[in-house]
Image (cartoon, rainbow, N blue to C red):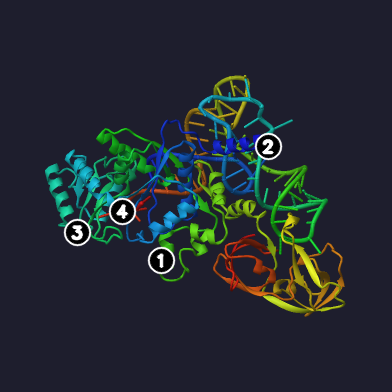
Amino acid sequence: MPEFFEEDEEEEEERLPRLDADEVKMRMAPYPSGPLHIGNARMVILNDEYVKRNDGELVLFYDDTIGSETKQLLPDAYDMIKEGLEWLDVEWHETHYKSERMETYYEYGKKILEMGEAYVCECDQKTLQEKRRDGKECEHRDRPKEKNLELWEMMLEGEISEGEAVVRLKTDMDHPDPAFRDRVLFRISEKEHPRVGNEYTVWPLLEFSWAIDDHLLGMTHILRGKDLVIEDRMEEYIWDLFGWEKPEFLHYGMLRLENVNLSKSEFQQKVKNDEFKGWDDPRTWSMQSLKRRGIQPEAIRDFILEFGMSETDIEVPPSKLYAKNRELIDSEANRYFFIPDPVGIELVGDLEMEKAKISRHPSDPDRGYRELDTKKTVFIPRKEWNQHQNEEVRLKNFCNIQLEGKEGKITGYENKDILKIQWLSDGIDVQLEYPDMSVKEGIGENNLDETKKGDIIQFERIGFVKIEKSDTFYAVYGHR
RNA sequence: GCUCCUGUAGUGUAGUCCGGCCAACCAUCUUGGCCUCUCGAGCCAAAGACCCGGGUUCGAAUCCCGGCGGGAGCACCA
């Protein structure tokens, strides 16, 4: 069988174009405003795969500049990101923080001002935008570099306050691409930073910090989403200014999950005001939340890798991820009965069985059987009880009944080709949490005591769940 | 509006660079059937696509031109 494996690997390999390079050093740069979510996973996994396949090195670079009102740093995010990376089995070799490298940015910021390639602009935000749109230069653009350096020092000294001045790169106010017209390199923010407090008020924007760091840290390949392509040109422009060698760029298209809105800043708000139960709330799609639901990290990797490196924008249903996960867990998960919203019915007729025997896993008889008590009173899900009145259904592995109100008339014991439902005569209280955070109460079979916290099992006819607490039985729904 | 990217079945991909072996790959989805005492898994089968229009060529999903569609950027966010 080895040839099958080889074929598989080759196929996978082709999804990612080969890197034509002797050395590979790449970096992933999460912004610590929350844990990694499924959307961030693409950036992370692609970097990791490229590096692993090319024997390269990977840098974890916390992109923790000061952010904005809408994008707020979150102190806990640093560790949550790390936790997510470890869970995804991403290997990295160095860790850096933008917030620790401010002096470096200042050094090169000053150089670029000395070169006369940048200027301090005191236009207010609105004016700046208008002039950019109209392709008009402002009066600050042409002032002598001595004046610029003077103002720069004032910025650093805190003599100019937030919003009153920025440093802009002198590209071309007439550039055909309005997005590329004299972009901002530094701006002032008086906000407190979770790691360096109030030590700095002048902060670089990502285009500048990346231009410097990607060179200084010796990146060979830069992987980024299509939404950041303009940063390529910004970096190249700055590298040319300094006469630096250029790494290679790789891009991937935008990935959306159908009917899912992934916004970390929005999630941050909702976690803060308790609308979400925390960062492992399934609605955040964080690695932490996926882990709770019993999604395997390998499933996420497979899911992401299937999209390859195409620059096409895609929208996929979450069920695609579930399909990958099911492949991994179906053979592992033992089967049990869970009756959500149970209704008790009385069986009418002779009980011919004392116990019902059902295999723990239908495809693996070696795992043996679980036994269920058969008594005159059995509980079935309210949904089925409602939907199948005056119909014959089969209590799986037990008997066939004709449902009439709160009675079930036993019509036989032989396996028949009719609807089979789960049932219980007794059991334990079970709570099942769904991805929308609603919790369904019901009873689960007594055999659940053979499971333990962290196990992934299947509630028959319901779906795969992960056991979060086994004393007061609490499980988290993964998917069907 | 301007700039850049992108357009293969419902969805996601392979093929596009270096035109013919593409009446187009694989997965998933859907529909039948088999199997199974789960609405899970497995097996078999079917259905389903090269955005449109020109051009080049013996021959175009692949090259050229023009449309049209989708996305992103035009933040003192990342």
User: In the shown orientation, is residue A77 left or right of residue A173?
Assistant: right
- The CA distance from mark 3 to mark 4 is 18 Å
Q: Earlier in the sequence, mark 3 or mark 4?
A: 4
- The CA distance from mark 4 to mark 2 is 51 Å
Viewer-nearest of discs 4 and 2: 2
Q: Position of residue B73 (x, y in %)?
A: 38, 48
Count of numbered labels shown in the rendering: 4
Viewer-nearest of discs 4 and 1: 4
Chain letter of disc 1 in the image = A
Viewer-nearest of discs 3 and 4: 4
- Discs 2, 3 touching: Cβ within 8 Å: no
Please name the residue that numbered disc 3 is placed on: A161
Dot 2 falls on a residue whose secondary structure is: loop
Please name the residue that numbered disc 2 is placed on: A1
The kind of residue tagged 2 is Met
- The CA distance from mark 2 to mark 3 is 69 Å
The kind of residue tagged 1 is Gln
Please name the residue that numbered disc 4 is placed on: A65
**Quadrant location of the N terminus of chain A in the rendered image:** top right
Residue A116 visible from this viewpoint: yes
The kind of residue tagged 3 is Ser
User: Mark 1 Cα within 10 Å, few/some/many (few <14, many 20+)?
Assistant: some
Residue depicted at x 76% and y 64%: A358
Residue A445 visible from this viewpoint: no
